[in-house]
Image (spheres, rainbow, N blue to C red):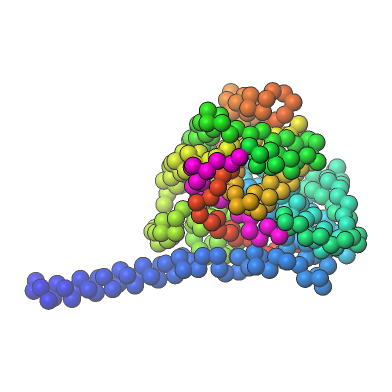
Amino acid sequence: MKRRTFLKGAGVVTVLAVGGGVWRGYDQGVFSTGRGSAYEPWKNWRSDKSEGPLGLVRAAILAASPHNTQPWLFRVTESHIEMFADTNRRIGATDPYLREMCIGLGCALENLLLAAVANGYAYQLNLLPEKTNPNFAAKIDLSTGDAFESDLYRAIPNRHTNRGPYVKDKQVSSETLDKLKMLGNNESDVTLIWFAAEAERRRVGNLICQATEAIVADRDQSHDSARWFRSKWRDLQHYRDGITLDATGYPWYLRALAKMLPQQSPEKNDLFWLKTTREVHVATASAFGILAVRNQDDPSQRMQCGRMWQRMHLWATTKGMAMQPLNQMPERAAREEVLGIKPQFGNVLRELAGGSEWQALMVFRTGYPTAEALPSPRRSVQEIMV
């Protein structure tokens, strides 16, 4: 082959490869991070006075939820708001007793109540108002009150789960950890236990990795967790939920590459999650925390736990801190209950919670971020009304 002919052919191949890559990048949202209808709720979160109580739901839907499942439904009148659990959005073997779902409902409730006060409403909260309907999570009766925009309310659009590396040499002070714990002083059935010393962090981190390994080895748990991962841009914009590549905390160039490459197998994704858990999440945590309740089977206490988590996360956001749930141990403990096997992680959590008075419901990490966390997609207010 003549050199000129070879170079011409190579140039055509290069143009096709680059052109195909650019098109796939466009099709996969490489150039559209945080854009599209799935992200509009983050921009239009403040209620319009003309909407009345409906506007408060705009703040509620920006709350944290397990796997970003957004397991809530709302019914709104001029005098009250009703919140329901959407059990169609359960995580299967990952959350068999709907404990995490209830935590997510509590998170949405906290945002809603902060928005109510900010918009001049006084409220009366009634959890589980109908004992015969366990999906009826809460009723909030509204009346006229004094408007007050708190720092937590203003932090609502800036709170995002940060799954990236945290600053290793910048520890969260004991004073700050105490202030976070004090945010739950009004929750008599919820407590916070910190693990901040180096030996404590090492032990809890190793246990989180072991629980992750167990989940990866459990086909049902792995499958039920993976189905909420939105690797395709079109799926993200269609479903408007789940964990996305942009929300993984990876650097921008890795996220761009992951979007352009063919979709990985579930097995490879699991191994990458395990590696990230060990080398990023656990390795860079400044402190681990456990939120515990007196009775983990009480839905109202689960929602109280969710309210405290949301409050803590909002407060941490105002201080430039990062937070991420690492709930693999409670998920494995629940799985052990379902399967009737030795309660390895059930026993560990009882020990970490300090005995029989408290039951561990949620494990998380905190620290200072190395990069800003990006928002996750959200369903619109219209999609979650009944």
Which residue lies at the image location 56% right of the left edge and 44% below the top edge? 367
295 horizontally vs 322: left or right: right
Q: Residue 25: where, in percent of width, then height? A: 42, 67
The quarter of the rendered structure image containing the N terminus is bottom left
> Height in image: 194 above or below 87?
above
Q: Which residues are magenta?
A: 154-173
Of 275 and 132, which appears nearest the observer? 275
Q: Is residue 213 above or below residue 72?
A: above
Q: Quadrant of residue 121?
A: bottom right
Q: Which x, y percent locates residue 344?
A: 57, 25
Question: 358 and 365: which one is in front?
Answer: 365
- Residue at the left extreme, as displayed: 2
- Residue 312: in sight, yes or no? yes
Q: Is residue 75 visible?
A: no
Does the magenta run of residues contain 275? Answer: no
Magenta span includes 155? yes
Q: Is residue 121 above or below residue 106?
A: below
Nearer the observer, 276 or 335: 276
Quarter where residue 348 is shown: top right
Q: Which residue is at the front of the view, 211 or 174?
A: 174
